[in-house]
Image (cartoon, rainbow, N blue to C red):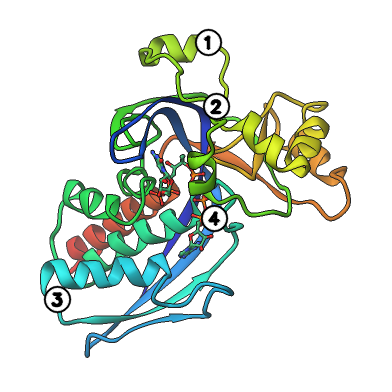
Amino acid sequence: MMVLPAPAKLNLFLYITGRRDDGYHNLQTLFQFVDHGDSLSFATAPDGELTLSPPLPGVSPEQNLIIKAARLLQSKTGCTKGAHITLIKRLPMGGGLGGGSSDAATTLVALNRLWQLGLSTEQLARLGLTLGADVPVFIRGQAAFAEGVGDIFTPAHPPEPWYLVLHPDIEVATAAIFNDPDLPRNSPVLSLQQRLLLPWENDCEALVKKRHPEVAKLLGWLLEYAPSRMTGTGACIFASFDRREAAEEALAKAPEGVRGFVAKGCNTSPLFSALQQMNAASSSSNTAT
Ligand SMILES: C[C@@](CO)(OP(=O)(O)O)[C@H](O)COP(=O)(O)OP(=O)(O)OC[C@H]1O[C@@H](n2ccc(N)nc2=O)[C@H](O)[C@@H]1O
Ligand SMILES: Nc1ncnc2c1ncn2[C@@H]1O[C@H](COP(=O)(O)OP(=O)(O)O)[C@@H](O)[C@H]1O
């Protein structure tokens, strides 16, 4: 059995620089991971069967990105093995934390190892992109400045503060934000160096605040404590702190009913770190035998 994390990501900034002919948008965004997320376990099933437990409320197994990722790997490689997959879901869905994409990425990476398929990171990232725009960054596992539809990467090393992430109790549909005529789509294309020096903003934030007053209200509250922004297309917002205790104090004072968590920013994904530990453990056991 293999147990691996599926961490959340934050978009430390997100600019929309244009719309392509296929309707997708070109972005400039800075991705960083946090040490909080879902957890998945995988056990090989010999007969090609794929099961996921427990099911996600409101998402059928066929729509679940975990099962989609596993099926994609089976069909692309002709692999006849299956898997029993267990999911501990901690990340809110439709929160801009990339939980579904992260689950898909962890599934591709885990089953590639468990089924001994030998696909490279590059091949897995290319497969992952067909499941969602955010999947490749989770497969690569390094904080990055992303351009194109979020699939052209430059490694980045932003500071790794503590974050307080808050979830207004709503789900924002990514496609609805990108299809809204009021979304600004004309941010300039700048270099990473230029972007790092300018204030970090999110081009989707004003529109999401307008469509969802709950987000505007909570962001107003959080801004009293620390610099704060929305991640992705929302609805989650985050604030950065130098000290964990300061983030936890703010969380304790959050308005009633608001859920959230405190986590550390990580430029190396917890998935990548877990895989490195697995590699080190297996090479030391090989040396011992
Ligand atoms: C914009 C980001 C930033 O991280 O938002 P979040 O979803 O994380 O909030 C992501 O790139 C989103 O990635 P993901 O959620 O995987 O999006 P997808 O399923 O690929 O696309 C959902 C829909 O959003 C629109 N879309 C998505 C990405 C993009 N670069 N341009 C778009 O126009 C398309 O209408 C698409 O049908
Ligand atoms: N394993 C999964 N975890 C979360 N959402 C999933 C999963 N599989 C499919 N989905 C669908 O993907 C949508 C986006 O989920 P998620 O990645 O959590 O949000 P976001 O893209 O805003 O960060 C959900 O609303 C849900 O319908």
Residue 171: percent from left, percent from top: 63, 54
**Can residue 3 be seen in this snapshot?**
no
| Sooner in the amino-acid sequence: mark 4 or mark 3 | 4
Q: Can you tell me whether the CB of the residue at mark 1 lies under 8 Å from the nearest atom of ligand 1?
A: no
Q: How crowded is mark 1: few (under 14 residues within 10 Å), some or many (20 or more)?
A: few
Residue 79 circle label: 3
Pointers 1 and 2 in contact (C-beta within 8 Å)? no
**Can residue 266 be seen in this snapshot?**
yes
SS state under label 1: loop
SS state under label 4: strand
Q: Distance between the residues labelled 4 and 3?
A: 29 Å
Q: How crowded is mark 4: few (under 14 residues within 10 Å), some or many (20 or more)?
A: many
Residue 59: percent from left, percent from top: 51, 72
Dividing the picture into quadrants, the one containing residue 190 is top left
Relative to 119, is 18 above or below? above
Q: Distance between the residues labelled 4 and 2?
A: 25 Å
- Residue at image coords 47%, 14%: 196
Q: Name the residue under label 1.
A: 198
Q: Residues within 10 Å of mark 3 (few under 14, many from 20)?
A: some
Q: How far apart are marks 1 and 4 (CA)?
A: 29 Å
Query: Left or right: 284 with respect to 43?
Result: left
State the quadrant of the C terminus.
bottom left
Q: How far apart are marks 1 and 2 (CA)?
A: 14 Å
Q: Name the residue under label 2.
A: 203
| Sooner in the amino-acid sequence: mark 3 or mark 2 | 3
Q: Which of the two marks, 1 or 4, is nearer to us in this view? A: 1
Q: Residues within 10 Å of mark 2 (few under 14, many from 20)?
A: many
Dividing the picture into quadrants, the one containing residue 4 is bottom left
Pointers 3 and 2 in contact (C-beta within 8 Å)? no
Q: Mark 4 points at which residue?
A: 37
Residue 44: percent from left, percent from top: 28, 81
SS state under label 2: loop
